[in-house]
Image (cartoon, rainbow, N blue to C red):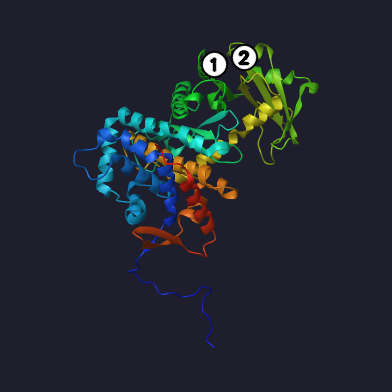
Amino acid sequence: MKKRIGSYPRVRVEGGGRAVVSQAGGVLLVETARKTGLDQTISAALTPWRKPRAVHDPGKILLDVAMAIALGGDCLADVGMLRAEPAVFGPVASDPTVSRLIDTLAAAGPKALDAIRAARGEVPARVWKLAGTSAPDAAGEVIVDLDGVLVLAHSEKQDAAATWKKSFGHHPLMGFVDHGSGGTGEPVAALLRPGNAGSNTAADHITTTRLALAQLPKRHRRGRSTLIRTDSAGGTHEFLAWLSQRGRWLSYSVGMTITDAIHQAVLKVPASAWTPAVEPGGEIREGAWTAELDGDVLKGWPRGMRLVVRKERPHPGAQLRFTDADGLRLTCFATNTSDGKITDLELRHRRRARAEDRIRNARATGLRNLPLHDTAQNRIWLEIVQLALDLLAWLPMLALTGKPRLWEPRRLRLRLFSAAAQLVSTARRQHLRFARHWPWTDVITDAVQRLAALPNPG
């Protein structure tokens, strides 16, 4: 009996295999783009940049790069993953062709950005209609979260600068539609800014909100059914006045900095006015209370604004600030929602923390760094990243159920997209056969069937 060496079996490795497709789970992204009509809208939008007798369509080139990013790529050259599997992804442009398109779109400036954004803005209305009860507006309200992202740069890229966290890079401001506790979220805005851009710049928040509203279905671009939610970076007079402007009528839930006036008002709140905060299930949150402030502290702010303060025992190891009181951490937010209990409004605002999950997913999907040098090029890259995040948000919403519906991009790649399959040709049609022993083959095939059952775009 020979003694076994090592814990793993030894296998011989050789090349030359045929009829095997790697990253075969990427067919889910292809079918999502097809059923949502994203491929058609992007192709039509970029028609002005298609040269006569060009072999590759600019819209498909851009969408191919987005799919490569969705599969885990982080540079333009990673589109080679798709080029290696033409049976699934079709003809894919060469690296020089991809680079030339990015340069051409970057040179076009706002015209190209507007075309891409307009194409993306046409799709959500159809996707949300197909999603039915899983759509983010199924409850009648759409919540858009705004938050900044620090993207580090390891070389002298254009507009890279020192950030407020003493790092070096860029500071984009992004917006995401919250899909609620039963889903993830999708991007609706991305404003590329230098690393030294201020966190509470009202003009940038207004611009990002305009971009976000343009991506929503038309019925949600104004009115109380759309809630804009930010942290204290959005708590400025100019931004709240813009949100409250007549004819716009947007709802908002915006964090506020604890000023001395607010701090003094909190100290005057009687103990009987504090209400225990609640958890999502309705149970009382231990060690947290909420109260509403009024009086002089609201002077100078938009009419109808409510100011809600929350005090909570700090977590172990957390350091208190000068604005805290009686050993309790104070936070505050403003809203123009006139009805509802303050505990429910506070819980709604606390759920803004989901934006941190969206940012983490964006970092894992092409936003870990900006791979190009010029700012104009990186603006195009940021739009491509949003296309990738769109696909990763719409796929679960349309085709996945149960726990897979909540899987983040890293898990989707590991369990679904990375699955290999055998390519079989029968009756002049090609079929992908996934391994029977792969634990998530049923998830893949069920998702493909749900996508196939959806109506084709007009």
Residue 20 badge: none
The residue positioned farthest toward the left in the image shown: 53
| Element carrying mark 1 | loop
Where does residue 180 sit, x and y in percent of width and height? 59, 37
For mark 1, does the 10 Å Cα neighbourhood hold few (<14), some (14 to 19), or many (20 or more) residues?
some
Q: Position of residue 116 (x, y in %)?
A: 36, 33
Q: Nearer the viewer, residue 166 or 332?
A: 332
Q: Which residue is mark 1?
A: 244
Q: Residue 421 versus residue 108: which sits nearer the camera?
A: 421
Pointer 1 or 2: first along the chain? 1
Residue shown at 32% from the left, 55% from the top: 86
Most distant residue in the bottom direction: 1
Please tell me in which quadrant of the rendered image residue 118 appears: top left
Quadrant location of the N terminus in the rendered image: bottom right
Residue positioned most to the front? 427
Secondary element type, mark 2: loop
* Crowd tier of the residue under label 2, counting other residues whose Cα lies within 10 Å: few below 14, some 14–19, many 20 or above: few
408 lies left or right of 288: left
Residue 103 against residue 416 in the figure, above or below:
above
Residues 238 and 347: in front is: 347
- Does residue 191 appear in this view? no
The answer to whether the residues at label 1 and label 2 have Cβ atoms under 8 Å apart is yes
Picture residue at 68% right of the left edge, 12% below the top: 295
Q: Is residue 246 left or right of residue 379?
A: right
Q: Could you tell me which residue is drawn at 71 percent across and 38 percent down?
A: 281
